[in-house]
Amino acid sequence: MWVSPVKSFKELGGVPGLKGVSGPPPAQIASWTRQITVAKMFDNLVGNIDPNLGNWLVDPNWNLILIDHTRAFTDTKALYHQLVRVDDDLWAKMKALDEASLTTALGAWLDKGQIKAILQRRDKMQQAIDKLAQTTASR
């Protein structure tokens, strides 16, 4: 289950496009920004407690690939990524989640506490998104 050819953010020296690390070409910036936004939202929802630069990969076409979520779906309520943007389509799907649908989809692998933690993280994301919207509106 290898993805090739790719480079990890660690190999690139950090997150592409930030702090002096070469980013995508201009034609790819919108797509790249959306991919980063979706990845952060996903990691926050699933409670990935190990989102390190070695687990974020990029291929030559600027496709973001996340690997190793073995430390996800914990019972943590913490959000590991600060949201500076929101993907509206993904957020609508996340807001529609409830305990019953998550139990049906994930109950064979997750216990009740882990499922409730997903919803609690989603609620914390709502708070962060509301705060982000207020900050954006006041500019």
Image (spheres, grey):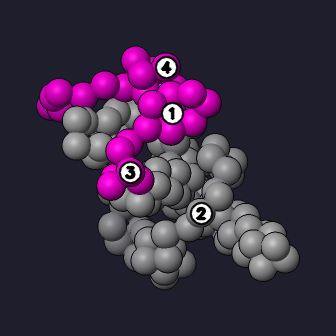
Which element carries disc 4, helix, strand or loop? Answer: loop
Disc 1 from disc 4: Cα separation: 7 Å
Q: Which residue was labeled with disc 4?
A: 13
Residue underneath mark 1? 15
Q: CA distance from mark 3 to mark 2?
A: 19 Å
SS under mark 3? helix
Which numbered tag is attached to residue 85?
Answer: 2
**Up/down of 61 relative to 133, above or below:** above
- Is label 4 in contact with label 2 (beta carbons under 8 Å)? no
Query: Compared to 35, does 57 lie above or below?
Result: above
Q: Residue at x 84, y 76 (%)?
A: 138
Give the residue at mark 3. 26
| Residue nearest the viewer, comparing 42 with 29 | 29
Quadrant containing the N terminus in the rendered view = top left
Query: Type of residue at label 2?
Result: Arg
Q: Amino acid type of disc 1?
A: Val
Say if mark 3 contacts mark 4, CB within 8 Å: no
- Between residues 81 and 21, which one lies in front from this camera angle? 21
- Answer whether residue 90 is magenta in the image: no
Residue 70 on image: x %, y %: 40, 34
Tell me the tag on residue 79: none
Q: Residue sitting at 32 percent across and 36 percent down? A: 58
In the rendered structure, which amino acid carries the disc numbered 3?
Answer: Pro
Q: Residue 113 is drawn in which quadrant?
A: bottom right
Horizontal side of 76 relative to 112 (left or right) equals: right
Residue drawn at x 64%, y 57% as measured from the top left: 83
Please report the bounds of the magenta region as a residue range.
1-29
Among numbered discs 4 and 2, the one appearing first in the sequence? 4
List x then y, in percent, for residue 100. Answer: 45, 77
Q: CA distance from mark 3 to mark 1?
A: 16 Å
